[in-house]
Image (cartoon, helix red, strand yellow):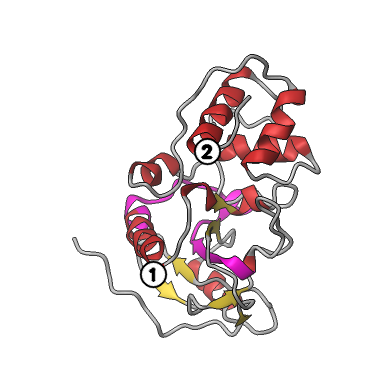
Amino acid sequence: MPLPPIRTDRVSPNHEPRPENTPVDMLVLHYTGMETAEAALARLTDPAAKVGAHYLIDEDGTVFALVAEDRRAWHAGVSRWRGETDVNGRSIGIELVNPGHEFGYRDFPARQIDALCDLCRGILARHPIPPRNVVAHSDVAPSRKQDPGERFPWPVLARLRIGLAPAPAPVPHWGLAWTAPALARFGYDTGDVHAALSAFQRHFRPKRVDGLPDRESAEILAGLLKAAGEDAA
C-alpha cells in the first residue's frame, strides 16, 4: 500500500530564520511523548508553546510538514553535538507520534518507520548530513531526554544508510577513562558522562541501558569512531 501524501494543512508558527552561512548538517529524531497525535499537533502548532519541528509522522504513516526546511524550528532545546550548541540552527527535526516513557511507551509501527525512511532519504538528498549526524534527541540532550528511546529501530534506518550501523572493533581498555573521551570524540556532551553513555547505549546497544562502561559498549563505540573517521585508540 502506498504511503499517504505529505499533509501541509497543519503548520507551526514556532520557527525563525536560520543563522547565515550555517549548513543543515544534522537530522534529529524525536518521539512526541504525548497521549495522542492530535495533542502533539496542537502543541507543535501553538505559538504559546514555542515548540516546533519540521515534520511529524503519525503511527499510520501520515506525514505532516509543519515548518519549511530552510527555517530554524524549535525542536531540540538546550543541546550539543560535536561541540555545536545551536543544534536547531543546523538541523531538521522529525517528531514521531509515540506516547513515550511517561504515557505507555510502545513499538513504532512498521508503516510509521516506512514513512520515516522515505522522508529521511529525501532530506539526506537535499542536505549535506553525514551519517554520524543522524541522531536521537537523547544523543544531543543526554541529561534531559530519552527520545526516541530504546524501542526505536535504528538498525532499519542504518540498513538504508540513514545513520551509522554498529560494527564493533576491539579495544585494549574499556573503562570510564577510555569511554568518556571516546564518547566526546564521537560527538556527545560528556558533562554528565553516565547520561552520555546511557544515550549512546539507548541508540546503539538498547538491550541494556545502564550508563556504565562495559566491553560491548566500548567495542561498538570504537567501531563507530572508525566508521566516522575518528581515532578509536
Res 64 quadrant in image? bottom left
Front residue of 146/194: it is 194
For the point 63% across and 32% down, the residue is 209
107 is within the stretch colored magenta: yes
For the point 68% across and 78% down, the residue is 50
Badge count: 2
Res 86 quadrant in image? bottom right
Front residue of 230/77: it is 230
Look at the picture and state if 66 lies above or below 157: below
Mark toward the viewer: 1 or 2: 2
Residue farthest toward the top in the current orientation of the protein: 172
Quarter of the image with the C terminus is top right
70 is within the stretch colored magenta: no
Q: Which numbered disc flags the more N-terminal residue, 1 or 2?
A: 1
Quarter of the image with the N terminus is bottom left
| Residue 177 drawn at (x, y percent) | 77, 24
The answer to whether any part of residue 206 appears in the image is: no
For the point 34% across and 74% down, the residue is 6
- Viewed as shown, does residue 154 lie left or right of 176? left
- Viewed as shown, does residue 19 lie left or right of 6? right
The answer to whether any part of residue 210 appears in the image is: yes
Q: Which residue is mark 2?
A: 229
Amino acid, disc 1: Val
Label at residue 35 = none
Amino acid, disc 2: Gly
Q: Which residue is mark 1?
A: 63
Start and end of the magenta stretch? 89-113
Front residue of 145/233: it is 233
- Viewed as shown, does residue 53 lie left or right of 50? left
Look at the picture and state if 106 lies above or below 84: above
